Every structure is written in C-alpha cells, then in structure tokens.
Image (cartoon, grey):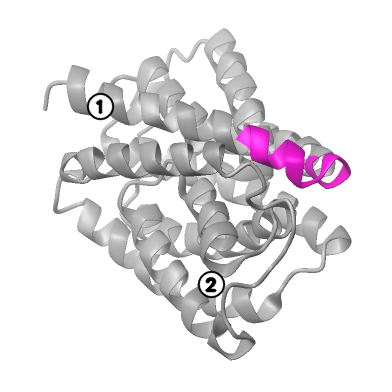
Amino acid sequence: MPDLFTNLDYSVLGLLGGFAFLAGFIDSVVGGGGLVQIPALFVLFPQFTVPQVIGTNRFSSFMGTGVAAAQYAQRVRIPWLAVGWAALGAAVCSYLGATVSSLISAAVLRPLMLVLMTLIALYTYRAKNLGHTEALRMPLERLPVYSLLIGMAIGFYNGFVGPGTGSLLVFAFVSLVGFDFLRSSATAKVVNVVADISSLIFFLWHGHVAFQLALPMMACNMAGSFLGSRMAILRGSAFIRIVFLVVVFGLIGRFAWDVFLVKS
C-alpha cells in the first residue's frame, strides 16, 4: 500500500503518534486503547478499509501491551495458573474471531456490546468496593475452567471487533474470579498480549498492516504503556477503578455512536 503514503503529512503522523501515546497509557492501566487509536486512524486515513485499520492498530499496540505486561510482572504477583488457561482460550478464539470478522459485519455485535457496556458501568459504579480487595469467588480447582472460558469469550471478541478487550478482561477477572483491580489489570495485560499476537497473524498474513504508520505508532504506544503501567502500580486498585469507569463510559459512547448515528 505504498501509494497511500506518497504525500504523507508529517504533522498528521505526529498527531497520530500523540494518539498512540495516549492509547498506550490508557490501555496499560485498564485496557481500551483501541477506543483512541481506531477512531484516530479512521478520521486521519478515511481511505483505509476496516481490516487495515484494525490490523494497523493491532500491530502498533501489541508491543505496548507487552511493555505493560512486563512492568506488572516485575511488581505484581500474577496468577499464572489463570493466565495460562485464559491465554490458551484467547489465542485460539482470537484468531477465530479475526477470521469471522472478515466474513460477517461487526455491526451485528454492536447493539449487544452497547447494552453489555452499560450494564458493566452501572454495576461497577454501584458496587463501590468492587475490586478493592481480593476474594476468590470459586474454589481454586475451578480457576482453570473459569479462566479458559473468560479467555475464549473475550479472545473471540478481541479478534472480531477489538475495542474494550482489555477492559472486558479486567472486569471479568474482578467480577467473576474475584481478583482486585490491580491483579486483574496485570492478568489481563498478559492474556491480551497472547490474544493480540494470535489475531495479528491473520492481519499480517492478509497484508492488512500499514507499517509506515504502525512502526512509529508502536514506539509512541510503548512509551505511553510504560508510563501508564508504572502509575497504575504506584496508585493501586482505586486509581484503576476510576480509569476503568472513564474508559467504559467512553466505550458506551463509541458503541452508541455506531448503533444510532452511523449508517450501516
């Protein structure tokens, strides 16, 4: 796709880098970086197809997610049993979701996601103590099953649509498993890396990544992820809960726009 970049304005590239930095910061704390990067790519490069936007976003963000995962792994006790099973489910179903996304319009899922995000926001807002302390909601021997199902469901969504994957993982580990927000965010980052790489294979294989944009965006995303993950570790679960609510309300606005204002 070199013809798309013959007259690339470097001020546009700088603006895109700023969005990528902000996306990395948000995504490293609680997920939802795609809420920033994907609309930016759509607005700045309207000639891109949906797979090109998602593929470029995915390539530019997976290393940022990896940076955040490494930061958490050094400072937070990560439940590797849960991570392993969730990552397995995410890896398989994320590639499957990416494949299905090329066959079926994501519009069929957007009304459902709007309702789901609204319920998540209301539940988290009303449950003031949710995720502040850790209390497993099931016997330890059931943790692999719960983690595998979480990874499969959200991994498929990650490949199929994408925005909010990290936030959904955080909420699932907080509400269904019983981790606090800090441990859930750390767990989600590791699982998210695996899901991103799995679905990225599809986009790379089919040539849907604009490397001229993805590489500089990746550098900015990694810088934002480093800063965001350090702040989340220092500030703890209460800070992550606030960012989580902000991101979820942003996702509600995004899906409401798609459902009610954007013509199919």
Please state the total of marks drawn on the protein image.
2
Closest to the observer: 78 or 264?
A: 78
Tell me the quadrant of the picture where the N terminus can be found.
top left
Residue occupying the point 41% across, 74% down: 149
Q: Nearer the viewer, residue 195 or 84?
A: 84
Q: Position of residue 27 (x, y in %)?
A: 61, 40
Image quadrant in which you'd find residue 158: bottom left
Dot 2: what SS? helix
Q: On residue 148, which mark appears?
A: none
Q: Residues within 10 Å of mark 2 (few under 14, many from 20)?
A: many
Characterize the local packing of mark 1: few (<14), some (14-19) or many (20 or more) Cα atoms within 10 angstroms.
some
- Find residue 44 and report its horizontal and vertical position in percent: 41, 16
User: In front here: 88 or 180?
Assistant: 180
Residue 23 lies, in percent from the top left, at: 60, 32
Which image quadrant is residue 25 in?
top right
User: In the image, which disc is placed on residue 258?
Assistant: 1
Given the image, on which type of amino acid does mark 2 rest? Ala
Residue 114: image quadrant is top left
Q: Which residue is mark 2?
A: 87
Residue 24 visible: no
From where the camera sits, is residue 76 visible?
yes
Between the C-alphas of marks 2 and 1, the distance is: 29 Å
Q: Quadrant of the C terminus?
A: top left
The magenta stretch spans which residues?
Answer: 232-243
Q: Nearer the viewer, residue 161 or 13?
A: 161
Relative to 204, residue 52 above or below: above
Q: Is residue 112 above or below residue 262?
A: below
Q: Which circle's residue, 2 or 1, is located before the other in the chain?
A: 2
